[in-house]
């Protein structure tokens, strides 16, 4: 593991690292903020999954999470959104919503993407092992959050591993990718035409099938241009109500899909996570 940068911030250290990933077969870059802590202490970990076109850098530079993490004693980890490098397949038309920067947190089964697009394994297995080995992380206290495509990832991973993640939240998530254009393109391209294979990567479908969490927190901007076509929080509200799944869904009027929105409510999400992480 190579450290690319380190900066003092709020008494802790913001680092960026790169390593050779066995899951993706490529180099992968991620950022970690470690807050100030007593020597020998083990701290809870919050995972943040980013959205379409993003890398680790978007939230690291614009998420405004460090002051809250320093106060609450949270390690904050932000992986990339897809494999990158020579030989990594991209969308043939160069579209932003598939391929590089758009891994959708799945393990692809379709050629040519299956060779490298294994973001599910990377985020749920390989990177946690690395964090646990090299940082003062208490891996018995993990939570997960994300934005847009990353909100989809946080919801589906959290619902799939309810005993691992003590809290799950999202900003403007894609809640039902099987029912919206972004998701249909991505899941079809990575996993093939059999929609039954898509269900484990669809939060609404997972809840319909019986997956549960103690609680969910979702913030959605009311002025988000993707709200009605791609995000559909109404579908999450409906399925949670029918299933008895606790959900706090807040429509924040006037806010859009950007990091201006995310940074506004980031500290509230982190405090919500910290309460559940102990």
Image (cartoon, rainbow, N blue to C red):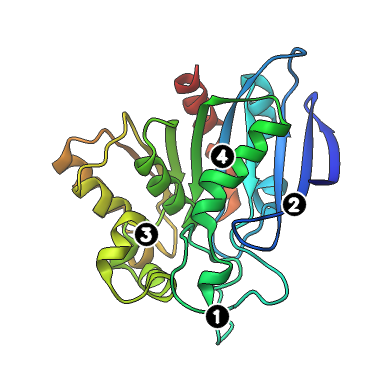
- In the orientation shown, which residue stands out farthest toward the front? 22
Instruction: Indicate which disc, 4 or 3, sits on the residue closer to the N terminus.
Output: 4
| Residue 249 position in % (x across, y down) | 33, 40
Between disc 4 and disc 3, the foreground one is 4
Q: Position of residue 178 (x, y in %)?
A: 30, 65
Q: Position of residue 256 (x, y in %)?
A: 49, 56
The residue furthest left is: 242
Q: Residues within 10 Å of mark 2 (few under 14, many from 20)?
A: some
Query: Answer yes or no: do the residues labelled 2 and 4 have beta carbons within 8 Å?
Result: no
Marks 1 and 4 sit apart, C-alpha to C-alpha, by 27 Å
Classify residue 28 as left or right of residue 126. Answer: right
**Disc 2 or 1, which lies upstream in sequence?**
2
Mark with earlier residue (2, 4): 2
Residue at point 38%, 49% (across, down): 156
- Residue to which mark 1 is pinned: 91
Q: Which residue is mark 3?
A: 231
Separation of marks 2 and 1 at Cα, in angstroms: 25 Å
Residue 40 horizontal side relative to residue 263, left or right? right
Describe the element under mark 1 as helix, strand or loop. loop
Which label belongs to residue 19? 2
Q: Earlier in the sequence, mark 3 or mark 2?
A: 2
């Amino acid at each position: 593991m190579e450290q690319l940068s380190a900066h003092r911030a709020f008494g802790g250290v913001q680092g960026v690292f790169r390593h050779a990933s066995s899951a993706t077969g490529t180099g992968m870059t991620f950022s970690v903020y470690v807050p100030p802590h007593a020597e020998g202490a083990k701290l809870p970990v919050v995972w943040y999954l980013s959205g379409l076109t993003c890398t680790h850098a978007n939230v690291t530079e614009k998420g405004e999470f460090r002051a809250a993490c320093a106060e609450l004693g949270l390690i904050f980890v932000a992986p990339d959104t897809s494999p990158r490098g020579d030989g990594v397949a991209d969308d043939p038309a160069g579209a932003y919503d598939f391929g590089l920067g758009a891994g959708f947190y799945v393990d692809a089964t379709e050629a040519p993407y299956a060779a490298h697009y294994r973001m599910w394994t990377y985020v749920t297995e390989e990177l946690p092992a690395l964090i646990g080995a090299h940082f003062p992380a208490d891996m018995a206290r993990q939570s997960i959050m994300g934005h847009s495509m990353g909100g989809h990832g946080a919801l589906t991973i959290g619902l799939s591993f309810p005993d691992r993640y003590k809290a799950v939240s999202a900003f403007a998530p894609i809640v039902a990718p099987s029912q919206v254009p972004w998701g249909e393109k991505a899941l079809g391209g990575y996993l093939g035409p059999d929609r039954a294979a898509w269900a484990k990567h669809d939060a609404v479908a997972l809840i319909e099938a019986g997956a549960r969490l103690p609680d969910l927190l979702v913030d959605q901007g009311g002025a988000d241009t993707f709200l009605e076509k791609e995000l559909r929080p109404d579908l999450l509200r409906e399925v949670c109500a029918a299933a008895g799944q606790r959900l706090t869904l807040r429509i924040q009027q006037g806010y859009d899909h950007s990091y201006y929105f995310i940074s506004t409510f980031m500290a509230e999400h982190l405090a919500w996570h910290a309460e559940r992480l102990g």
